[in-house]
Amino acid sequence: MDTQPASALLEGGLAALQDFADLFTHLQTLEPPADLRKGRQAAGNVRTSAGDNELVGVGVDDHPARPTGRPDTLVDTGHADVAFRVLPQTSAPSWLHAIELGATTTWETWEGYKQGEPEASHNHYAFGAVAAFLQERIAGLAPAAPGYARLRIAPVIGGGLTSAAISIHTPYGQASSAWERDDSGAVTLTVQVPTGV
């Protein structure tokens, strides 16, 4: 058995950990790919599925640094109508199906239960991309720089929604975005931006 001093093992482990940290930091600086093919494929999956179960293949995006999910992909590639159609769906597979079953967290599977027993985790980010989508795209408040040092306010309005609002506490103070559409279709947007942001 080949033995090494503990200090050599520790140095090797620290070097590997630093390599991983450097890679992760690099991945965080990458923008999600603007892949029209992926958006068309996701929209096609939704549009060609049968019955009420329109949410097919719409889960966590495969970009390693920012799991924003397919609702963003649909909107970014010109298919916001499809994203708005799958959001209110309550039959499995869908985000609201779990709520219909009493969920108060995001589940690891679309069904949540198998033969009456809990299946997998009931507190898992697997399909949590929709939460970021609701805050950053529907209500329209997203960080434009790390730690909300800058804000992006750009709500996606549509799908029969008449209003959306979000308020969050950032390291710089309270930030909010709220929009409301009246009967004529006119939209009023109200924002709160912390001083210095």
Image: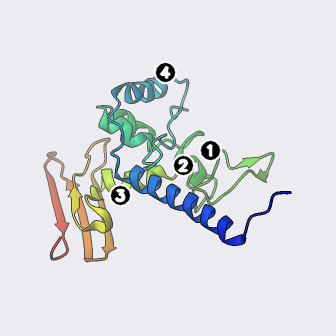
Task: Answer whether residue 155 is visible to the viewer in this image.
Answer: yes
Q: Which residue is mark 3?
A: 135
Q: Amino acid at mark 1?
A: Trp
Q: Which residue is mark 4?
A: 48
Q: The residue tagged with tag 1: helix, strand or loop?
A: loop
Task: Answer whether residue 84 is visible to the viewer in this image.
Answer: no
Q: Nearer the viewer, residue 139 or 62?
A: 62
Which is more N-terminal, label 2 or label 3? 2
Q: Position of residue 164 (x, y in %)?
A: 30, 57
- The number of numbered discs placed on residues in the rendered structure image is 4
Residue 171 lies in what quarter of the image?
bottom left
Give the number of the mark in front: 4 or 3: 3
Q: Whole-Å distance between the Cαs marked 4 and 3?
A: 28 Å
Residue depicted at 31% across the width and 50% down the height: 137
Q: Which residue is mark 1?
A: 110
Q: Amino acid at mark 3?
A: Gln
Residue depicted at 51% across the width and 41% down the height: 59
Residue closest to the far top = 48
